[in-house]
Image: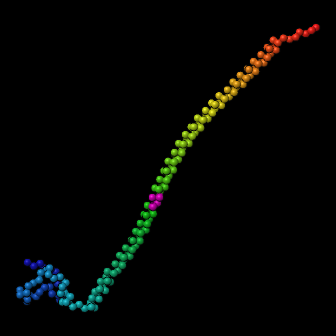
Amino acid sequence: MSVPGPSPPDGVLSGPPDCLGAAEPTLGLSDTSPDEGLVEDLMVDDKAVEQLAEGLLSHYLPDLQRSKQALQELTTSLDFVLLDTLEQEISKFKECHSMLDINALFTEAKRYHGKLVNIRKEMLMLHEKTSKLKKRALKLQQKRQKEELEREQQREKEFEREKQLTAKPAKRT
């Protein structure tokens, strides 16, 4: 069973001629490469090859150059996009870092505020104590002055009494 393949180009033999018959064994597909024997059998004009190459280049080269230019523009725009994205990420990182610093500052401010509140309470308590001590000292001072005054008055009374009790010489007349 033979599988029909693509038709060979004009002037190229597709297989062994039928005139050889069965005397020679036919080669299998895996025994030879498909291009083997074509270079020897095919006579190609160098001018034709050159014209075909030029035609092929003239047909595909403009598209390839446009594609190259488009790829360069795309690469350049992607570079700008990537740089912009990178700058945005860096700014976000800096913002996060500054937020951490701000959070630390707020935490520290809260701690110092608590300390200030405690100091204020202590100062109010000390003020109350000093006010009470001043009042007590004033009362004690007034009490001492009063006691001294009473003692002085008592001494004067005693002195007057002794003076009155002291014998007075009678007046001679």
- Residue at 72% x, 25% y: name it: 145
Apparent side of residue 156 relative to residue 92 in the rendered image (left or right): right
User: 170 above or below 76?
Assistant: above
> Would residue 6 be visible to someone looking at this image?
yes
- Residue at 36% x, 79% y: name it: 65
Outermost residue on the top side: it is 173
Query: Quarter of the image containing the C terminus?
Result: top right
Apparent side of residue 159 relative to residue 129 in the rendered image (left or right): right
- Residue at 34% x, 78% y: name it: 64
Which quarter of the figure has residue 155? Answer: top right
Which quarter of the figure has residue 131? Answer: top right
- Residue at 68% x, 28% y: name it: 138
Magenta stretch encompasses residue 47: no
Which quarter of the figure has residue 134? Answer: top right
Give whichever of 5, 41 is nearer the camera: 41
Apparent side of residue 139 relative to residue 22 in the rendered image (left or right): right
Query: Quarter of the image containing the N terminus?
Result: bottom left
User: 107 above or below 142?
Assistant: below
> Number of marks in the image?
0
Residue range of the region highlighted in magenta in the rendering? 90-94
> Would residue 7 be visible to someone looking at this image?
no
Give whichever of 76, 170 is nearer the camera: 170
Outermost residue on the right side: it is 173
**Residue 148 rendering spot, x and y as whole percentages:** 73, 23
Outermost residue on the left side: it is 22
Q: Main secondary structure of the magenta part?
A: helix
Give whichever of 128, 50 is nearer the camera: 128
